Amino acid sequence: MTSRSIESIAFAWPSLPNYAARCIRSVIERFPGKVTVIGTRPVFPLVGMESHLGQAVHWIDGRDAKTDWASLGLRSPDLFFQGGFYWPAFNSLGASCRSDGGKVVLQTDSNWQGTPRQRLLDPIRHRLFFRRRFDGVFVPGVSGTLYAARMGYRPATVLQGLYGADPAVFNGEAALHSRPKRFLFVGRFVEVKFVVGLAKAFADFAVGNPDWSLQICGAGPLRDQLPDHPQIQVTDFLQPAQLADVFRNARCLVLPSLYEPWGLVAHEATLSGCALALSQVVGSAPDLATESNSVLFRSGEVGAITEALRSIASWDTIRWQEAEVASRSVAAKFGPEPFANAVAQFLERFGTKYD
């Protein structure tokens, strides 16, 4: 493969979130002057997005299939990280990049669950319609790597580290065993998050555990269905710095999702030293949940969540200390620095020389 000096790298990220801006900034700092960032507007805008990134974002309408590099005032990059293949604008930019001789890496959080559809339909569909568009795949973790392999990508072209919170923001202070006895949920109040089921499970748990509380942080159409309970506190979505304080005052994150491609919030929790209670479908479980720091439970079952809460509440001081050590250890595998390392590896694996 012929090497060429890298002159430009571009990222196109749907609903560009704060954690992505912080990860991309680590690439910008490593390759100054060579990185372009394109995004569609986030649903919940965050204060200081572009200051966290360190440069301006090219905001586009993802539905515009006629989007091209020239219309954005840019040249086609040598390496393009494309966020999924659902936005017509991103697909157009990716096709143009490849036709100009650049490399295109698919960014996807699709994770391997072993369902009949994934085993039978998805590999055929992906090979027919998508495989030829991409030279590699950037995935969050283990389950994403398995999915990419099933879709026909060679191991050398698939790297982990796509998602990750910033340890400069999310980090623990008080020892886990000394924190308030508080469970925490962070996410949207929608059916797939099973947050109402969690509230019901906690209400059952609370009957014999009056010293524990549950903080539910987020927003969504199911807010009115959350029960009014003296040990349950419901708060709105918070800016990252405020959310980090919430994690520092909680012992365990509970993520009862019915479907969760990865679950960045689980990484925020482990960076903060928290334990995890996750449904078995959470994509980050193979990366972040260990025997020491977590309890996994069947998705969609209120009783299973209640038993998980009881199990965690029974931990002694030594077990809480072991959980904190394990969480901080696994959390180190993800974040801005591992993200930038993966980008550098993509450059090397494609045989591209960079300064």
Image (tube, rainbow, N blue to C red):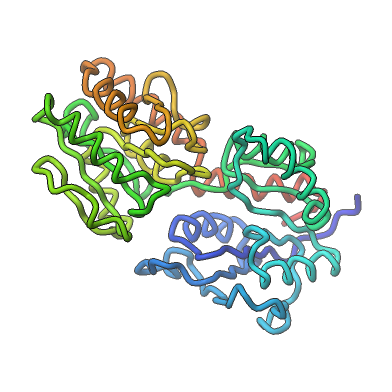
Dividing the picture into quadrants, the one containing residue 76 is bottom right
Residue furthest out toward the right: 1
| In this view, 327 is above or below 192 | above
Q: How many marks?
A: 0
Residue 307 in the image, given as x and y percentages of width and height: 29, 23
Looking at this view, is 164 or 208 the one in front? 208
Residue 242 in the image, given as x and y percentages of width and height: 25, 55
Residue 285 in the image, given as x and y percentages of width and height: 48, 32
| In this view, 330 is above or below 121 | above
Position of 14 with respect to 71 (left or right) is left
Q: In the rendered image, which quarter contains the C terminus?
A: bottom right
Residue at 54%, 71% (x, y): give it: 40
Residue at 53%, 46% (x, y): give it: 337
Looking at this view, is 85 or 256 the one in front? 256
Position of 289 with respect to 71 (left or right) is left
Residue at 86%, 54% (x, y): give it: 3
Residue 185 in the image, given as x and y percentages of width and height: 30, 44
| In this view, 46 is above or below 251 | below
Position of 268 with respect to 4 (left or right) is left
| In this view, 82 is above or below 207 | below
